[in-house]
C-alpha cells in the first residue's frame, strides 16, 4: 500500500496542526457529530484547511462533510476500504 501511495500520490500528506484539534472537537458538538464521525470531521477539517477538495467513496459521510462545509467529490456509490485512503488525498488534477 505504501508503495502504491508513494507512486501515485507524491504530494505531502495533509495534516491538521495539533493546536487546532481541540477547536475541531468543539465544532463537532453543535451539529451533533459524535463517535466515528469525529474522524470524518478531522479529515474534512484537514482538507478544508489545505484549501483542497475532499474525495470520498463513502456516501455515508455526506452529512458530516456538509456540516464541516468542506468541498467534497464522491466517486462511485459504495464504501470500500480504499475509500478511506482516497479521502485523505486532494484533487490536483482537475477531476
Image: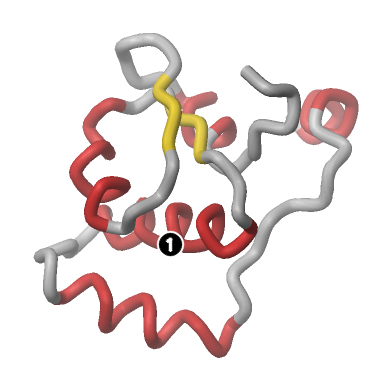
Q: Is residue 51 left or right of residue 13?
A: left
Colour pattern of the rendering: secondary structure
Q: Position of residue 23 (x, y in %)?
A: 38, 85
Left or right relative to 63: residue 74? right
**What kind of element bears circle 1?**
helix
What residue appears at the point 17 percent right and 64 percent down from the top-left corner?
34
Give the quadrant of the N terminus: top right
**For residue 80, above or below residue 85:** above
Expressed as whole percent of the image width and height from the top left, the position of residue 63 reads 19, 43
Seen as rendered, the residue at the extreme top is: 76
Residue 66: image location, x then y, percent: 26, 47
Q: Residues within 10 Å of mark 1 (few under 14, many from 20)?
A: many
User: Is 31 displayed left or right of 11 in the figure?
Assistant: left
How many numbered discs sit on the rendered protein? Answer: 1
Question: Which image quadrant is residue 75 in?
Answer: top left
From this view, report whether residue 58 is shown above or below residue 35: above
Relative placement, left or right, of 48 versus 24 is right
Residue found at x 51% / y 39%? 54
User: Which residue does the image show at 18% across and 62% down from the upper left?
Assistant: 33
Viewer-proximal residue among 54 and 81: 54
Q: In the rendered image, which quarter is residue 62 located in?
A: top left
Q: In the rendered image, which quarter contains the C terminus?
A: top right
Q: Nearer the viewer, residue 10 or 50?
A: 50
Judging by the rendered image, the residue that carries numbered circle 1 is 42
Percent coordinates x, y for residue 40 in the rendering: 36, 51
Amino acid at each position: 500500500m505504501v508503495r502504491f501511495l508513494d507512486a501515485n500520490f507524491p504530494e505531502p500528506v495533509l495534516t491538521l496542526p495539533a493546536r487546532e484539534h481541540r477547536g475541531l472537537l468543539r465544532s463537532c458538538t453543535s451539529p451533533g457529530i459524535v463517535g466515528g464521525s469525529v474522524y470524518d470531521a478531522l479529515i474534512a477539517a484537514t482538507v478544508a484547511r489545505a484549501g483542497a477538495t475532499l474525495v470520498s467513496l463513502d456516501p455515508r459521510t455526506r452529512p458530516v462533510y456538509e456540516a464541516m462545509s468542506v468541498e467534497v467529490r464522491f466517486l462511485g456509490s459504495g464504501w470500500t476500504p480504499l475509500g478511506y485512503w482516497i479521502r485523505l488525498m486532494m484533487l490536483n488534477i482537475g477531476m
